Amino acid sequence: MGHDVRIIAPASRTITDFGDRFIPIGRPYPIPSSESIIRVPISLHLAPAIKKVMAKEKFELVHLHEPFMPMLCSAVLRFSDAVNVGTFHAAEGKPGYNWGKPISTWMIRQRLHKLHGKIVVSQAALAYHSRYIPGPFEVIPNGVDLERFSDDVAPFEQYLDGKKNILFLSRLEFRKGLNYLLNAFLLVKQEMPDVRLIVAGSGTRLRRRYERWVRKTGLEKDVIFVGFVSEENKPRYYRTADIFSVPATGRESQGLILLEAMAMGKPVVATSIPGYASVITHGEDGLLVPPRNYQELSQALLMLLNDEKLRQQMGANGKAKSKDYDWKVVSRKLLDFYQRTIDRVRGSRNQ
């Protein structure tokens, strides 16, 4: 849209995709958090690099994701003299687990006054963050690149053998609920032999455990672990699937992968957690089942597997809904929020 943008982030390798628009600061290290893994730079020497970049670039606006997250985001917020906007993504944290920690409480107290605009990606994220951070908040969801997630891509031919394909595409973490999907799939196979589960996503420790369970139950021919999937191949896996399912147990603020599948015209079977329910309308573009209930999950999968017309109808409804999340739409909302925040801050500074 003609704006000059820089991306600041830690990097473990040389990034060339964005030219001089990408500015690496720090090296990311994996840290367990909220039943997942976050990657943050752990260093006491970020300040000189940040100060140098801020002095050179002279940003009008800095947009931080999880702005109170140590180390990089909170440090940039500390040294930024620009108009600062933050997006909060998390949802459903345990009481006292994240923001309740002394370091997070201290961080909010020290840096809150420097954050001029606050965004949450969903109502679920709003419900969580508004407990600890005063508003107001603007709800602006994550977007989907509809040009990339389209029917133009080719499916994987090796899976087009007459069997119905259920796709799980996410990190192999406990909270993503693959263990419940595997148990549901075992029940599905008892009633419909010609069905396959494709498991796509990174993770080695849990993958070995899941693979052992699959061998023990005799499902190894119809549960396919494909491992890490590149961004280039993600649309092809969605295109190959008849149904997309990720029965996460919680802590999902929106469900971007659900939107990607919907953009590809695929019906979704997911769990009725707040973040997913903000995307899926039960009975219209997908089916929502209680978390951790593999019996109801299996029944929802069978309902769609046995009804091609329903699959097509829900897929079409999801495809239509995904247009509201097109990055072309979301970016305009962001720019509007940027401008309103800049005007308000400048107005208060000129008083």
Image (tube, rainbow, N blue to C red):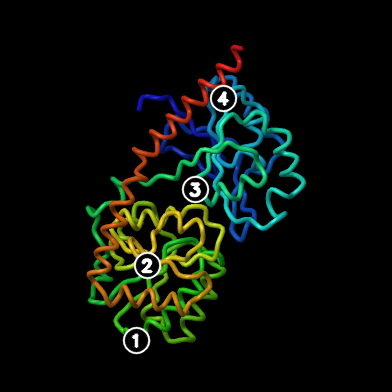
**Distance from Cα at disc 1 to Cα at disc 2:** 18 Å
Helix, strand or loop at label 2? It is: strand
Disc 3 packing (10 Å; few <14; some 14–19; many ≥20): many
- Residue named by callout 3: 122
Mark number, residue 176: none
- Quadrant of residue 227 in the image? bottom left
Give whichever of discs 2 and 4 has the lower sequence position: 4
The picture places residue 140, in percent across and down from the top left corner, at 46, 41
Marks 2/3 in contact by CB < 8 Å: the verdict is no
Looking at the image, residue 225 lies above or below residue 81: below
| Res. 104 in view | yes
**Distance from Cα at disc 1 to Cα at disc 3:** 37 Å
Of the residues tagged 3 and 4, which is closer to the observer?
3
Quarter of the rendering occupied by the C terminus? top right
Give whichever of discs 1 and 2 has the lower sequence position: 2
Looking at the image, residue 351 lies above or below residue 185: above
Kindly identify the residue that appears in the image at 29 percent across and 81 percent down: 194
Question: In the picture provided, is 41 more to the left or to the right than 183?
Answer: right
Mark number, residue 83: 4
- Residue named by callout 2: 167
Helix, strand or loop at label 4? It is: strand
Disc 4 packing (10 Å; few <14; some 14–19; many ≥20): many
The picture places residue 216, in percent across and down from the top left corner, at 49, 86
Give whichever of discs 2 and 3 has the lower sequence position: 3
Give whichever of discs 4 and 1 has the lower sequence position: 4
- Residue named by callout 1: 191
